[in-house]
Structures are given as C-alpha cells and as structure tokens.
C-alpha cells in the first residue's frame, strides 16, 4: 500500500451540497462528511429546479468545506489533494463546485482531481468494504441506472442500462402523480408498506427482450392510467388506493431489477472473477424492498452482495474524496483547464442507449 493520503471532496451535481475529508492508509476512513440538502427549496415545484439548485450550491459550498475541515480537525496544510465532481449533472451546480475547487487548489497549491460523479458511486464499495476488482455494480439512482463491471478506478464496462427514465426518476414522478412529497422514493416506499402489490397488473418492461437494458417510463404511464381510471370510476382516490398503487409500482420496479440483475450476473460470472461480488449503490439502493430482493438474487447465484450504508447511497462528498484518491494513485492530475460536464459516460466505448439526446450519452 502506498503512503497515506488525505483528500477533501466536493460534490454539487444535483440538489445536495456536500464536502468531506477522507483518509486512506491501510484502510479508508471518512474523517468528516457534511451534506446540506435542498428539499425545502424545491418542494413547491415538485422537483429540482436547476437555477435554484445552482444558486444554493454557490451560497453553501464555502460553509460546507469549512465545516468538513473543522469536523476532521484538519487544515489545508494537512491535505494531499482536492477532488471535485466535474460531471455529469446539472451544469450550474457542477460548475459551482469546480470553480470553488479550482480556487482552493490555486490558493493552496494542492493537486486537483476531477471525478465522474458516477465513478464516485461505483467506487463506494471499495471505500466501505475494501472490495477487490473486478465486481459487478448496479448503479441505480435518480438520474442513472446501469450495470457496470468495475475493473479499475478508470476502467468500467457497461453491460446494460435504462433506455429512458431511471428508477429514481420514475419514483419521483410517481410520487408527484399521487400527491406525495419529494423526494419521491422514500414517500412511495412508505406508502407501499401498507399496500397490496397484487391489486394492479403493472407491466414489467423489456423482460421479453434479451439483454440487460431496462425501461421504466411505460411503468410510470401505466400507473397514471390506473390512477385516472380509479378517479373516473369512484370520483376520487382513496388512501388505500394510493398505497396499493405505490406497492404495485415498487414491486414492478423490483421485479425488473431482479431479472436484469440475474442476466448481468450471468455475463459477469463468465469472466470467472476470483471473488464474485454484486455491489449496489445510488439513491434507490436505499429502498429496503428493492435492496432485499437484490440481495436474495445475489445469494441464490452464489455471489457476495454488498451495499453501502444508507447515508452513502445518496449523493455525498466522501465518495468523491475517495474516488479522487484512487484516481490520484492511478496517475490522474487535472490542471485549471478542468471543465464542468453535464454528460460524461463511464464507459466511453459502449454505444449510447436510446433516449440519450442529441448531445450524446449521459452516462
């Protein structure tokens, strides 16, 4: 193991402003992690407003960095580098973080490392569990859903992904359709606990096609139609209706993820990894029902299952700091030409999935 490294991490890709200090020696240690959410700022709009998010990041980043250093009991002289999310994400927020990191690097002389936000999630199992390469990663969040074989800190092979909405996005839209608060994932999950998942015959998109690609947009539309039918027939939506809709939707998402995970594991195992492991990360990994179903699938196929603590499933800067250390040790250095990128696929060799837009693949 190389000498001890201590990095400051900065994250501002969506609606969480975060800073953290991570140290890696024989093992990784999170010395501090500060996350300031923006739920209250966006609540009235039913989703994240990019302009509001960017302004909040610009106002809060300095304070988050200061607090992270204070909690770690360190100053800039104790750091070996600064890591910052430089994409993909809402460009205003990403730019806020990148500009702050550049200013700090200029003032302190510390190395600057730009981190792909998705790599932060994908490398989190190495931060929390010291996982050895290669492992299969299901990255499932509000904006992304993909299967990755992680071979190294800069080596990712995508073997499947969503062709439209990510599960987290579908959860948020479902919550909005049912009058539930944002973020939608926890709200839908809470309602589903008391619901009947068998009441509505929701589709399981793309299960009739080979491969590991996924689709969740049609599932959201099916829920909308079921809701509208109930309203038309009975003149409104009752509490148990909403619970059953949430339960059926959540079960459909879980069923799709389980089936596609089985296929992804089959492809991954063809490479005969020495210690086969399925890791799950991203905000939707915090959903207990989905997490439990994926763990059962992994165990049934003789593969170790791991998922980060719930606080590291959602956006945070500890994963960025850790990824920065991995990239630094791998030889990456970024100067002041580092740019903020709204789109940045981890596997640049994989073909863009449908729905990626005119500007190319998001991830």
Image (cartoon, rainbow, N blue to C red):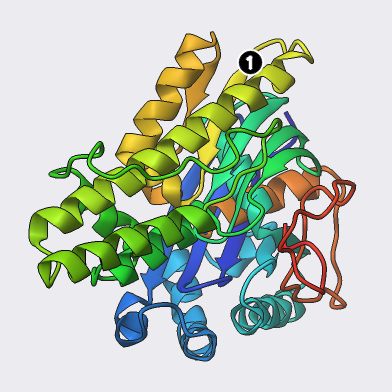
Residue 84 in sight from this viewpoint: yes
- Residue 195: image quadrant is top left
Which of 310 and 219 lies nearest the eye of the viewer?
219
- Residue 107: image quadrant is bottom right
Q: Is residue 215 above or below residue 26?
A: below
Q: Position of residue 197 (x, y in %)?
A: 25, 39
What residue is shown with label 1?
A: 276
Which residue corresponds to the image point at 70% horizontal and 48% vertical from the top-left? 325
Q: Position of residue 61 (x, y in %)?
A: 51, 79
Which of 37 and 112 lies nearest the eye of the viewer?
37
Which residue corresponds to the image point at 30% horizontal and 87% vertical from the top-left? 44
Q: Is residue 126 left or right of residue 251?
A: right
Residue furthest front as drawn:
233
For the image, the number of numbered tags is: 1
- Which quarter of the rendering shows the C terminus? bottom right
**Helix or strand or loop: what does disc 1 sit on?**
loop
Which of 146 and 57 lies nearest the eye of the viewer?
146
Q: Say few, some or many: other residues with alpha carbon within 10 Å of mark 1 (under 14 / 14 to 19 / 20 or more).
A: many
Which residue corresponds to the image point at 48% horizontal and 27% vertical from the top-left? 306
């Amino acid at each position: 193991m190389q000498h001890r490294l201590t990095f400051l991490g900065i994250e501002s890709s969506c609606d969480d402003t975060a800073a953290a200090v991570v140290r890696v020696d024989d093992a990784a240690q999170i010395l501090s992690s500060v996350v300031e959410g923006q739920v209250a700022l966006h609540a009235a709009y039913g989703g994240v407003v990019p302009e509001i998010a960017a302004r909040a990041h610009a106002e809060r980043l300095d304070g988050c960095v200061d607090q992270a250093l204070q909690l770690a009991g360190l100053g800039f002289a104790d750091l070996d580098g600064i890591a910052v999310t430089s994409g993909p994400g809402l460009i205003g927020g990403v730019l806020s973080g990148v500009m702050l990191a550049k200013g700090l690097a200029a003032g302190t002389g510390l190395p600057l490392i730009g981190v792909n936000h998705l790599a932060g999630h994908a490398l989190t199992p190495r931060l929390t569990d010291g996982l050895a390469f290669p492992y299969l990663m299901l990255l499932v969040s509000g904006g992304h859903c993909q299967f990755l074989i992680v071979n190294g800190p800069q080596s990712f092979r995508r073997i499947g992904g969503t062709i439209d909405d990510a599960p987290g996005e579908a959860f948020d839209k479902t919550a909005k359709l049912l009058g539930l608060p944002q973020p939608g994932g926890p709200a839908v999950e809470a309602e589903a606990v008391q619901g009947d998942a068998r009441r509505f015959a929701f589709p399981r998109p793309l299960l009739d096609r080979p491969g590991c690609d996924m689709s969740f947009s049609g599932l959201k539309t099916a829920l909308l139609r079921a809701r509208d039918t109930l309203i038309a027939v009975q003149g409104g939506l009752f509490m148990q209706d909403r619970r059953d809709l949430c339960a059926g939707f959540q079960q459909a998402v879980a069923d799709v993820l389980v089936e596609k995970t089985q296929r992804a594991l089959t492809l991954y195992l063809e490479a005969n990894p020495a210690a086969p492991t399925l890791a799950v990360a991203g905000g939707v990994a915090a959903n207990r029902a989905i997490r439990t179903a994926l763990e059962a699938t992994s165990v049934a196929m003789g593969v170790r299952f791991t998922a980060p603590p719930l606080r590291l499933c959602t956006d945070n800067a500890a994963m960025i700091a850790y990824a920065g250390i991995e990239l630094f040790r791998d030889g990456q250095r970024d100067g002041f030409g580092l740019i903020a990128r709204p789109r940045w696929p981890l596997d640049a060799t994989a073909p863009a999935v449908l729905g990626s837009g005119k500007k190319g693949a998001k991830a």
